Amino acid sequence: MNVALYAPFKPLDHPDPSGDRTIGRELAAALEAGGITIVTPSRFRTRWFSTRPLLWLKALAARRAALEAASLARVKVWLTFHTYYKSPDILGPYVARELGIPYVVFQGVYSTKTQRRLKTRLGYELNRRALLAARLVVTNRRLDYANLARLLPKNRLAYVRPGIRPDAFAFDAEARRELRREWDVGDAPIIVTAAMFRDDVKTKSLVYLFLRLGELAREGTPFFLVIAGDGVMRDKLMALARRELPDRHLFLGRVDREDMGALFGAGDIFAFPGIRESLGMVYLEAQAAGLPVVALADGGVPEVVANGRTGLLTPPGDDAAYRRALCELLTDRQLRRDMGEAAEAYVREKHDRDRNYGVMARVLRRLAGEG
């Protein structure tokens, strides 16, 4: 069965890595594993549609092109990945209506506060209309489910846990030995962190981590920090690391996702605070490799880290608590090992992509009348 999969925020083959792109790719892979043929009906991006009148002019042509592509491919369902006020889906409801096929949303987001600002009002209205047009809206974040339930009846809503392919990040002992030799860090516990160096909460989280680790370094706690990522804030972050963590850090630059498993496996702890983190797929990837997590109990992080079992989550704003959590894992090797083993098992049990997202293939077939 052919399914149109459209991502209005950015295409799933976009070169810039992000958690959002990861979720979309994992969804597509799970659907294909379930026998679904994915069709990309459009690459039209609606990011900040509210404030870009030129996009309004291009939208009509994009609609016609998407309708033609979906019709030629004989798709049985239109599936939109991630519609929200900033990037509302203005293609899917139209095409699905014209073709008489079900319109489904995965990772729909609804926030009423965006209707009160002039800059976001149009995006809010367009996103609201898209969500109301959907036969089914699926989300992988519980807070989003609660917000969507204010707009849609529960028989048109579903929640699935976020998932990855755990084997892609399985522990590799040989890779661990090679990387640790290459880094030449001795026996000190290695903390791994990874993020894009964007001028937003990603960089704020890294700054927060560097400052807390700087406090531990001045207390004499042994560790070495390895940082994967790149972006416009690189120089600022490198300067801060030189000040707070002299001779205790290594910037690797951007690391391909297929190489992240080896990187995680070479570490002992994964630490990324996750300030206002929407979900954080990187936490699942690190845990799949057997790393315990130290993060804030903020945003969607508690949905992917089992506090006290696979990692330590601390209250946002409590700097001392976060520092203590880092110190506890850095100084207790057995705790690191126990939590790391629990983390690997947790991801396999609760966050396996094919199990969690695989059900979507059956749902789409049922909606199309083929299940």
Image (spheres, rainbow, N blue to C red):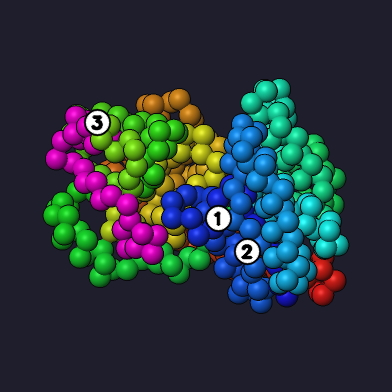
- The Cα–Cα distance between marks 3 and 2, rounded to whole angstroms, is 43 Å
Identify residue for label 3. 240
Identify residue for label 1. 11
User: Could you tell me residue 308's position as x and y percent?
Assistant: 48, 45
Mark carried by residue 40: 2
User: Could you tell me residue 287's position as x and y percent?
Assistant: 43, 56
In which quadrant of the rendered view does residue 79 lie?
bottom right
Q: In the image, what residue type sits under mark 2?
A: Thr
- In the picture shown, does residue 91 fall above or below 220? below
Q: Image check: 128 left or right of 334?
A: right
User: Could you tell me residue 30's position as x and y percent?
Assistant: 60, 68
Asked if the residue under mark 2 is in contact with the one under mark 3, i.e. CB atoms within 8 Å, the reply is no
The kind of secondary structure element at disc 3 is helix
Q: Is residue 13 visible?
A: yes
- The Cα–Cα distance between marks 1 and 2, rounded to whole angstroms, is 9 Å
Mark carried by residue 341: none
Residue at x 54%, y 58% (from the top left corner): 12
The kind of secondary structure element at disc 1 is loop
